[in-house]
Amino acid sequence: MISNSQTLIARLYGSGYTQGINSQPGLMDQYFNLGSKILYDTRVIIDGSNLYHFLYYHYKVAVQYGGDYDHYARKCKRFFNTLTACNVRPYVVFDGGYDPDDRKLPTVLERMENRRTRAANICIKGRGCILPLLAYETFHLVLKELGIPHVSCVYEADREIAVLANKWKCPVMSNDSDFFVFGMDGGFVPLDYMNLTLCVFNQETEVASVLEPGQKLGKNEYCYIPVKYYNYEMFTKHFKKSDTSFILPLFATLTGNDYINASVLANFYASIHVPKNPSKKGFKFNTQTHMLAVLYWLDSVESWEYAIQHVVGHIKSDEKELVRGMVLTSFHSYMNIDDFSDVEIDIILEAQNVKTGNEIENKDVPKLTDFFKQEIPSWFVKKLRNCEITGFFLQNVVVNHRVIFNCQIEILRELSTYACSRDFRSVIYGVTMNSKRKENEAFKDSRKNSIEEYDRDIKNTKKYYVRPQTSVINDAIVQSLPSISQVPDLDQSERKNILFGALGFNMSTIDVENDSSLTLLGILSYWIGHAQPQVTESHLWSVILSVFVLHIRALQWLEDKRGFGLQPVVPEMLSDVVKAIESASDKEIDNFMKHMEKNRSKPDHSSKNPQEMRVIHGFSQFQACLVDVIYLNQVLLSPVVIPSPGVILNCTFVYNLCRDLETRPKPDFYSEEILTKESPLHRLFLLWKDSVINLCQSASPDSFDYSNRGTSVRTKKKSKSGKAKKGKRDRVVEDAGSNSDSTDKDAETRDELTVNCDVNNRFAMLGLDE
């Protein structure tokens, strides 16, 4: 440890910086005795399922309108670029699907209800944060763009991460409190306790300083970031016994977790107590006395075998063996971290290393069985582990025949936004259930012949059984759906036709040759045709113009980076849009972006200018359609390229623009003004808009809601009919969201972490003094 660097760390963290997971100052320092450390020149294992949540909250990306994915993508890149500057080599590990034993189902459903409550809070008060629907896909594509190795475990990743960290002798980054329990030699860095300020250490002068903008490193200098660091030995050294390895695993088990409910151990808790005059004054608890009692009791036992025998002795006779099994399973899951249990994730991560150029082979992929206990094709499992197929949705579909949907920002008295694409998902289910579909047609709706969807029904949770489709129609041709074992045998055009057929439109009628653009237009058409309540043409215009704006900004960002002599990674974009932008004059681009600038700011809401949930609900339905098309594309081995949500959707922008367009009696004139009539962008806009409208009207002449055209929100508020007041429940008077664009520059210079991450810190009550 470097003394000068320690001084700088203390200054950077300062009083009040380390807020702790439960917003109590210095919580982790108090309870787990965190030490200061500098992070540089090392591998690091990152809990990916935790990180992509954390980054959205940490950077305060706006969520009140559904998610600003361009801003989120930039911040994810900034985070990893900061690590790279310190020669910290990240390896990201994700959770997989839910375990088929349903052990976590009650917990997941409880979280679903909690999220729905938080979503309602945002809708009513404008305060709070929930992770937007497309955040994972955005984050995953950032990892691909930057070439960062990443892998998905079969089920929960915590234990596999601990095994890998011990194997590589490197630290783990996460906010999951379970990592305080695992005996990891490389230690644990809580994400809440990273300061992302780049610092410089001079090895000759031994002086540490903050890296200034534009500063170049000298010959004997290196970059680092200050962090708070924990190693289990920091805790166990307070116990006066030779073998302390079992204390934390037993403590975590006996205070309740997913394996065993604390209520089962009520009689055991009654048999132990906290000493009146405890000698171990390092332990401090304000609540949860039984946890403190367990801690003192563990300091008195000599072995884990005796401890478990004592616990089981206080269980009812008919439950003894069941409880013993649960306690042992939990205990060993924390203790035994020498070998991977499901898949050698180090092999997959090393194979992704661009320097080696290796590819994971099927022999390295573990076997996985579906709901009917039949082996899933190795290509599918391989892509699950490589994160080329989204495991928390598609693995749950194949293995559990169950998916659980988290509420978006939406109108809670309307149908769930996921209902918009339920028919489309039945095509996904048709492919994934194909091999057993016919045998189970006789069953009434159940997981034997349907996928069980847990979704919102007004303000309650409801189970829906969705039957799989057997075929799709494309260009008047009926095409039977393949099983997942048959998908690799289809050529790209056949797989693409299934995707377009699932969208329900004859895509050959559209004068667009690029498959990615065709897919986007198909998604827009499907969304408009299935939205309930209906969306407006202003919704359509806003998404198209959002694509244009985000592509322009992405190209400008690339140009700026190249201007500094850098070689930035080019994100996947729609070639039609890129071509139109490059063909337009600088004056036309400047004119367009100048008109769009006002829509990038956070809306100024008040009682006279309330937030319109109707507008947001429509865009949330679009997100549901987009993510389901992404899933089907993955199942079909990606016959089309779907760009990142970061170059498609900024929900603050589309919300502002949609409301603006709805006040204009002649929006066509406005489009000519902002895009410059007959410019390349204007021609592309008309082509896309007219194509989508024609597709929608061919399916239904009443696809759009025209009731709001040319009517301002304020005018509706004053109308005598009272209709505007009727929707008061769905409007937000106050708004606590942050503007993703206007705060960019501030965030660039102010990268200290604030504690906003929703983490389940079960061991926060445990206190130690030096």
Image: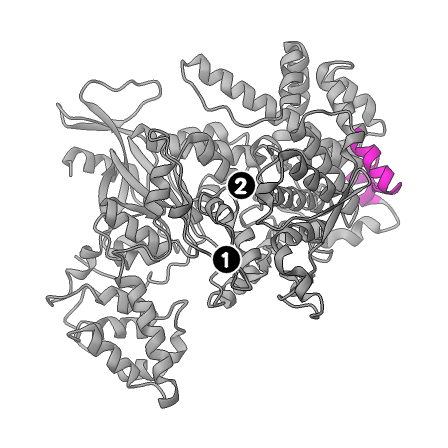
User: Where's residue 198, x and y in %?
Assistant: 31, 30
Q: Are marks 2 and 1 in contact (CB under 8 Å)?
A: no
Q: Which range of residues does the magenta coloring cover? A: 691-718
Image coordinates of residue 424 in percent, x first then y, are 70, 49
Helix, strand, or loop for circle 2?
Answer: helix
User: In the figure, 596 relative to 604: above or below?
Assistant: above
Q: Nearer the viewer, residue 37 or 500?
A: 500
Asked whether, in this view, residue 175 is left or right of residue 71, the answer is left
Q: Is residue 469 above or below residue 644?
A: below
- The residue at the point 16 percent across, 33 percent down is 4
- Work out how far the residue at label 2 is from the one at label 1, CA to CA, in angstroms: 27 Å
Element marked by disc 1: loop
Determine the residue positioned at 46% across, 56% down: 368
Quadrant location, the N terminus: top left
Question: Please, is residue 250 above or below residue 341 in the view?
Answer: below
Where residue 91 sits in the image (x, y, percent)? 35, 40
| Residue bearing the label numbered 1 | 375
Q: Sort mark 2 into few (<14), some (14-19) or many (20+) by Cα contacts within 10 Å.
A: some
* Mark 2 residue type: Glu
- Can the viewer see residue 391? yes
Q: Is residue 716 magenta?
A: yes
Q: Which mark is residue 137?
A: 2
Looking at the rendered structure, the kind of residue marked 1 is Glu
Quadrant, the C terminus: bottom left
| Residue at 66%, 12% in the rendered image | 583
Front: mark 2 or 1: 1
